[in-house]
Amino acid sequence: MSNNSVLFLGNDQSDWGNISAKNPVDQVSLSLNDSPELLNNFVKKHNGKFMAGFISYEYGAKQLAAPVHNSEIIPAVHFCAFDSFEKVNGAFLSSSEKWDTFNPVISRAEYDSNFNKIKNHIRAGDFYQINYTHPLKSKTDATPENLFSTLRQKNQVGYSVFMEHEDWAIHSLSPEQFIKIENGIITTKPIKGTLPRGESQKKDGQNLDALLNSEKEQAELYMIIDLLRNDLGKVCKTASVQVLESKSIQKLEKVFHTYGVIQGTLKSNLHPIEALLSMSPGGSISGCPKKRACEIIHELEPLARGIYTGTIGYILPNGTLNFNIAIRTILQQGKDLTLGVGGGITIDSNIEDEYYETLVKAASLQPNI
């Protein structure tokens, strides 16, 4: 693939198209200080074309008037418009690229210190739940395209994206849909609740039962469903928002997740891109209440998340918009790889379990695992 190219790959359980596009006819990159109207105007200008792009975590948080760190590696928002796109086969040539093990940037002591600060904030009533994350680093000699091919073989997830630019490449192996807007209906599918897969069939079943019966994981999921009901309520017609699924199971290569499904009817005077901006950053990767959680994230996390926990997706020529939550997402800059990991912390969270969960989420993106 070439610079400014995109590749989207789903699976049998997702409604994510297997789509590739290259050679954009136009593109827009925004800084943190640029108005969202620039993105709105770009999307409206290219109505009827295939568009693909991302909104970083920080750009979404800034729209809430929360303080943010600036990423100097990638734009805060980047969208491309294409005259054409291709539907592709989900299977492609095998690749066995190598990369170093992803290792944490922060020390365990720093993680523990911040975890305890979060618990104090919850006790003080600042928020109910927060998504605390930290970066892992690695290096590779692989080309971006070959690295993505290898990662995709290991992660047959529903919402994966490869996006290559002159200065960076994004490998998003995300299992989570953020929002889909089709024919005026907006759907969101937040993931909250994680346990590792078992090494045997018996252990696998035990872990699944433990996840389904965990009061802590269920409370976390229901909190985020409630938050997203409120987020949808701001962009949807009155009384149209419904919870279609309150606790469903997703089985991935290395983990089980629980998730919900919420749906509503978009206000007729609102463009889908405006709804996407309004709901960013996603509730499942920020916290509840969202603005206060984003303020504390800025205090605790010293580096910009960038694309990680932002949103990546596409808009079809017919206007259908489909975007993921950019988790299990690697940013490649030359030989340097950065992978963010994290998890939701509530008053019932256990420090050992939460730290272990962050590493489990990276397991399917580690080499030779």
Image: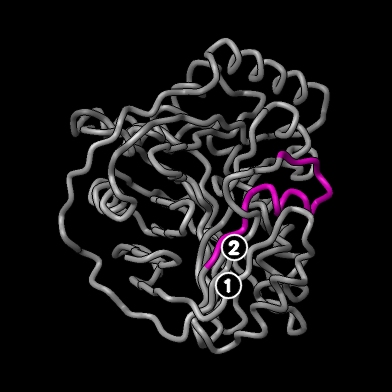
- Quadrant containing the C terminus is top left
Task: Give yes or no for residue 126 being in the magenta stretch.
Answer: no
**Vertical relation: 335 (above or below) 352:** below
Instruction: Determine the secondary structure under disc 2.
Output: strand
Q: Foreground residue, 362 or 102?
A: 102
**Vertical relation: 40 (above or below) 107:** below
The answer to whether any part of residue 220 appears in the image is yes
Instruction: Determine the secondary structure under disc 1.
Output: strand
Q: Give the crowd class for mark 2: few <14, some 14-19, many >=20 residues within 10 Å.
A: some
Asked if residue 122 lies left or right of residue 325, the reply is: right
Residue 80 in which image quadrant: bottom right
Residue drawn 52% across the image and 31% down it = 135
Residue 103 in which image quadrant: top left
Asked if residue 29 lies left or right of residue 189, the reply is: right
**Vertical relation: 168 (above or below) 313:** above
Residue 249 is marked as: none
Amino acid on which disc 1 is placed: Gln
Q: Badges 2 and 1: C-beta atoms under 8 Å apart?
A: yes
Which residues are the magenta region? 53-69
Residue reaching furthest to the top: 109
The answer to whether any part of residue 205 appears in the image is no
Percent x, y for residue 284? 60, 46
Amino acid on which disc 2 is placed: His
Percent x, y for residue 202? 21, 30
The residue indicated by pointer 2 is 78
Residue drawn 36% across the image and 73% down it = 19
Question: Which sits earlier in the primary sequence, circle 2 or circle 1?
Answer: 1
- Quadrant containing the N terminus is bottom left
Q: Give the crowd class for mark 1: few <14, some 14-19, many >=20 residues within 10 Å.
A: some
Percent x, y for residue 161? 41, 59
The residue indicated by pointer 1 is 27
